[in-house]
Amino acid sequence: MLKNFFYFSVVIFLLACNDRPEDIDSGYSEFEVYCSPACYFFDSELGDDNNSGTNEESPFKSLSKILELEIESGSSLYLRKGRTWEESLILPRGSFYVANYGEGEKPKLLGSKKIERLWGQITEDIYFVALTINENEELGHVSKNGEVMTFAQWNTDLETTFASSPYESFSIDPSNNQIYIKESSDPSNHEYSYSRFPYGVYSEYSSRVYIRDLQIEGFSRAGVFMLDCYECSVYGTDIDGIGGAWADSFYYGAGIKIEESFDYGYLGNNSVSNVYGSCVDLSIYESGYLDETTHISGNEISYCGYSGIRVFYSHIENSGQHEPKKIRISETVVSDVGNSWSGNLLGDGIHIELDDATVQFLELSITGIIVSQNQNHGISVDGEIDELYISYSEIFDNAKSGIYFEDETGVGSVAKVETSLIYNNAEDGIVLNCPYCSTATVHHNSLNDNGVSNITISEIGDGLDIRNNILNNQANIPDLKIQDTLIPSQISHNCYQNREGMFDLEGTKYSTLADFQGLGFESGSASGDISWVSSEQGDFQLNENSICRDIADVFIAIRYDKNCKRYSAPRSAGAYEFLTPEDASSGTGTWCY
């Protein structure tokens, strides 16, 4: 999937916690069981809730046992590998470390239950079953033979609910907890399950809650839910099949859900898939905040209904005291958002939204990610961002734009898109609409065959700087489209494939580089044969005969070329430096940091 694009450096996130093992501060390596101030063990098969629970030989059976004990804050909870718990892990307030012990697969929290009752038949292809739902349970979705069925939102009656729904669809009447399915054959030949518990892991008003190396599957609202959590993390956890619960006139569902505050938070090396809403959802309301650094790194995210990663900041009280400072998203793969069992609720791969004009992110950094095949934008950013930085990323095959940035009120904002591959997006490769930006830079990117334009500058202040890019598109679709932008701007040292309609400035089309240069732009640029190795197969390295070789302006922020050489001589344009066979075989063609 990486298509020989980037070789990412190892990102280590340091958690400042004095009462945790030293290895947590060095990247979550393997370590021995740690029992200070105390530790508790759980085994769903061999455990007994009458045991002491304080050693591997005498484990508890039920996770609910935690709430019966007076567990000291800072304790560790260990779940035996290869075991399954059909219940939620509800943590008391405090600091806790949740991990595993033993041999085998990661321990599983399973929020679903097999439907044992016989299905009743209403019409030729509509079947139903009525279930008894306990006080702590909540219906969410239905699985058939282990796969979540297609969601049909309940709409007054069966006929309207399933009018346009395909076979293997389900719906739930929230008034009576009856499950309905649309099937082409007798459901007795298959195995069905329903999600019944709201949360896999639940924590509120706590600090230093570390969730590590679990499987969480089939819950109705969230795989992991953290309400107002300081210096908390979810690491190495697999989350699948989440959401669908009905409450307060709308449906729920997030893989990892954070509300109010997530100060010094870390979400790393998780796999999140098949989620009703957003796979990762940071929703900060009321007086909550995201102070200091929040880091999302190394995750694999797919088949979410709303967005792969959502950061939503709204209704801030005491603005200026708790402004979010840094959000970092790195080394993460996001794909197929909008293709979930819930359908396309939005479809952004990464969706960042500030809903309060008085608040600014001081820094939003997105680096080393792959975002593809999403049903809306690859990356969408809307709101006052003091500095947006997107780099070393591959963004392709999204149904709208690759990058869509809109900040219509932020005075002095800075937007940077650097050293990325952006191609085959159905609309624009990059859209920048930031009328008050002090700086908007687009450097060292390779853009190819984006459907509306490669780069659209909708509205920018006087700091536009487009340099060292390679741009190619289909005939009569502009590589560069600029409107409502203060002139002059720095546009130079770019490389274009010769064809008609390459430029669109304020609605006027220019079909050759010479025509555009006649306006005073594009010094040091070239047009002709770009000569990529194989753009059809996603290989955007330059052949030796490419006109884009050795034309880049060296006086910009990128320090090294792909061969790890300082820019003492001109480098090539675009996100790739040409590699000779000797370079490739000797391994000197990796990115340098």
Image: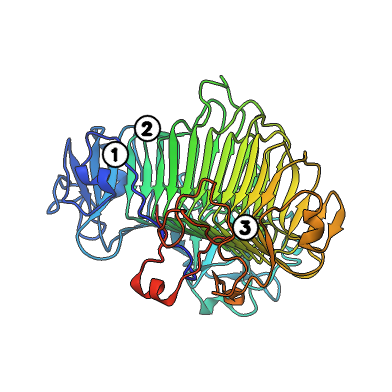
**Kind of residue sitting beneath label 2:** Ser
The residue carrying mark 2 is 206
Answer left or right for 104 relative to 442: left
Q: Residue furthest right?
A: 508
Residue shown at 67%/35% (left/top)?
437
Task: Verify CB contact (< 8 Å) between mark 2 and mark 1.
Answer: yes
Task: Verify CB contact (< 8 Å) between mark 1 and mark 3.
Answer: no
Would residue 75 be seen by someone viewing this image from the given angle?
Answer: yes
The residues bearing labels 3 and 2 have C-alpha atoms spaced at a distance of 47 Å
Q: Earlier in the sequence, mark 2 or mark 1?
A: 1
Across and down, in percent, residue 416 comes to 59, 45
The residue carrying mark 3 is 469
The residues bearing labels 2 and 1 have C-alpha atoms spaced at a distance of 9 Å
Secondary structure state at the residue bearing disc 3: loop
Q: Quadrant of residue 149?
A: bottom right
Q: Nearer the viewer, mark 1 or mark 3?
A: 3
Secondary structure state at the residue bearing disc 1: strand
The residue carrying mark 1 is 96
Q: Identify whether 372 is placed above or below 187.
A: above
Answer left or right for 416 relative to 134: right
The residues bearing labels 1 and 3 have C-alpha atoms spaced at a distance of 48 Å
